[in-house]
Image (cartoon, grey):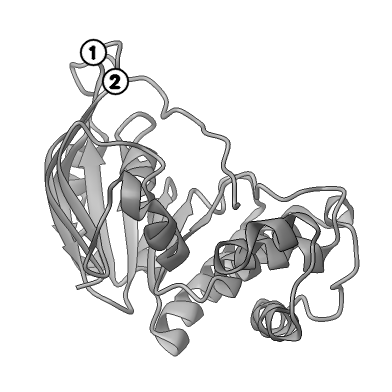
Amino acid sequence: MAIKINNIHKVYNNGFKALTNLSLEIERGKFTAILGSSGAGKSTLLRAINGLETITSGSITVSGVTVCKKNLRTVRSDAAMVFQNYNLVNRLSVMANVLTGRLSKRNPLLSLLHLFPKEDYAIADDALSCVGMETSPWSRADKLSGGQQQRVGIARALAQNPSIILADEPVASLDPVSSTEVLTLLKNIARDRNITVVTSLHQVDFAKEYADRIIGMNAGQIVFDGAPTELTENVLERIYQKSPVKEIPDVQMEVSYA
């Protein structure tokens, strides 16, 4: 099992219950989409799997490793993140951004000096080829379109050689054409590389088209778990009905790849 979540709760300091009594298992090599309105807990769940959020109670294992403080480096090396706003270093080249995906594998001092072995460049080249960005390795990140930047973000994730990719609203900032390209890419990665892809989405049609499995969340709980064909209007009403609990947006976090 790629991811196993057992009865987790997440309560913020202000008392807001972001996740409640949530249990879930996700098998390897599948494309899973998480649907839900803003504040439903989608991003909190993804960040908890990667250890970017500390759960209040319960347990999470990633590839058999328990997500906890002492295991964070191992977990984050195996479960790569792709972000809504790309999280690239704009002044650096495409290649340099992709190589940051290798930081967890290397001596921190050498990484700070951007000294990477030939092996890492070969891995980065392969990742860029996979996402169709092999012709622009030395372009500055801030010269790219949104769709291109997101593909670089996916290449950076691939450079980690992960078994899991967690994509937090990866197409929220993209136009429909770029969104289709990015989701097709993630779908192909899951199928061709046997990488587990878990992504949060707002677009129901995209989830139906690309996902092998859809998880619906409302007020921090799972209210649907099934195949895209089972996503009926009644199910959608259950996912998107307004919660009596005051909803707040998921907290955004700065992420370091060191």
**Classed neighbour count for the residue bearing mark 2: other residues with Cα under 10 Å, few (<14), some (14–19), many (≥20):** few
Q: In this view, does 63 lie above or below 220?
A: below
* Cα distance in 3D space between marks 2 and 1: 5 Å
**Residue flagged by tag 1: what amino acid is it?**
Gly
User: Who is closer to the viewer here, 67 or 220?
Assistant: 67
**Classed neighbour count for the residue bearing mark 1: other residues with Cα under 10 Å, few (<14), some (14–19), many (≥20):** few
The residue located at (43%, 45%) in the rendering is 202
SS class of the residue under badge 1? loop
Q: Name the residue under label 1.
A: 15
User: Who is closer to the viewer here, 25 or 236?
Assistant: 25
Q: Is residue 64 above or below residue 16?
A: below
Query: Looking at the image, can residue 206 be seen?
Result: no
**Residue flagged by tag 2: what amino acid is it?**
Tyr
- Is there CB contact under 8 Å for labels 2 and 1? yes
Quadrant housing the N terminus: bottom left
Q: Is residue 137 above or below residue 52?
A: below
Where residue 219 sits, quadrant-wise, is top left
140 left or right of 116? right
134 left or right of 177? right
250 left or right of 95? left
Q: Where is residue 165 in the image (x, y as percent from the top left)?
A: 44, 65
User: Who is closer to the viewer here, 16 or 122?
Assistant: 122
Where residue 33 sits, quadrant-wise, is bottom left
The residue located at (74%, 53%) in the rendering is 146
Q: Where is residue 174 in the image (x, y as percent from the top left)?
A: 65, 51
Image label count = 2
Q: Name the residue under label 2.
A: 12
Q: Where is residue 257 in the image (x, y as percent from the top left)?
A: 59, 52
